[in-house]
Amino acid sequence: MSIRPLPIFGSDQELYDALKSRNEKAYERLYADSFASFKHWVLLNNGSEMDAEDAFQKGLMGFLLNLETGKYQLQENTRVSTVVFEYCKRAWFTELKSARLQKRSVMPEMINEVDSADVASDLERLEIVEAVRQSLDQLKGECKKILEWFYVDELSLRDIADLLSMKESSVKSRRYQCAEKLKTFYLQTANRLGL
């Protein structure tokens, strides 16, 4: 069985036009460019591989529907895969808020015996992660978005600038200011939690 090579589109405009004309190869390219990083992101955000597949499908369908109805128009210097990632993220956040996931608890398939030193280290790390989460929750609006996009989603400053319709240098400056705010919130939270 031979594997077909993935089609190459010279630009995001070409990919966008191919998607708009329902070109199946464009769907394959978009899936190849977007799904792996989205799955990784979902796994880091309390989801499973199946959750990632579901949210990706919902997000992709939302994107394609908006593309076909004209609600989404490709902006200059915007990557289609970045936009799809955002649609999929919204689908995942909706899923996280649903009662189905809030009530679901997953039992481990097997329990391994663990060294108590490892447990103490893991607990300490979890406390630090919780302090960072609480600190992030104190950030509002654009600040929170910029830091999550840059540090969690690993978007480039250029991609973030495109999403916010700002200059890259402005995003860089704003990211620094937001990181300083986050650091202040973290120190307060860590102090309150006794870390």
Image (tube, rainbow, N blue to C red):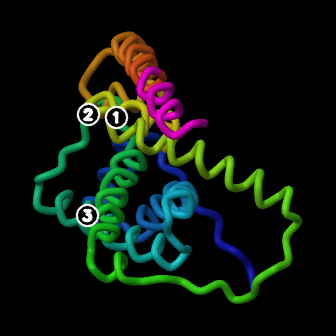
Q: Callout 2: helix, strand or loop?
A: loop
Labels 2 & 1 near each other (Cβ < 8 A):
yes
Read off the residue under disc 1. 144
111 relative to 147 in the view: left or right: right
Label annotation for residue 71: none
Amino acid type, callout 2: Lys
Q: Which residue is mark 3?
A: 64
Q: Position of residue 144 (x, y in %)?
A: 34, 34
Q: Residue at x 40, y 53 (%)?
A: 85
Residue drawn at (45%, 27%), measured in percent from left and top? 188
Name the residue nearer the viewer: 128 or 87: 128
Tag 3 secondary structure: helix
Q: Position of residue 173 (x, y in %)?
A: 39, 11
Which quadrant holds residue 108? Answer: bottom right
Instruction: Identify the amino acid type marked 3.
Output: Leu
Residue 100 versus residue 173 in the image, above or below: below
Q: Residues within 10 Å of mark 2 (few under 14, many from 20)?
A: few
Q: Is residue 173 above or below residue 21?
A: above
* Sequence order check, earlier mark of 1 and 3: 3
Quarter placement of the C terminus: top right
Instruction: Determine whether 123 is above or below 136 in the image.
Output: below
Q: Which residue is mark 2?
A: 140
In 3D space, how far apart are the residues under numbered discs 2 and 1 (Cα atoms)? Answer: 6 Å
Q: Per the image, is 83 magenta?
A: no
State the image coordinates of residue 19 (x, y, percent, origin top left). 32, 60
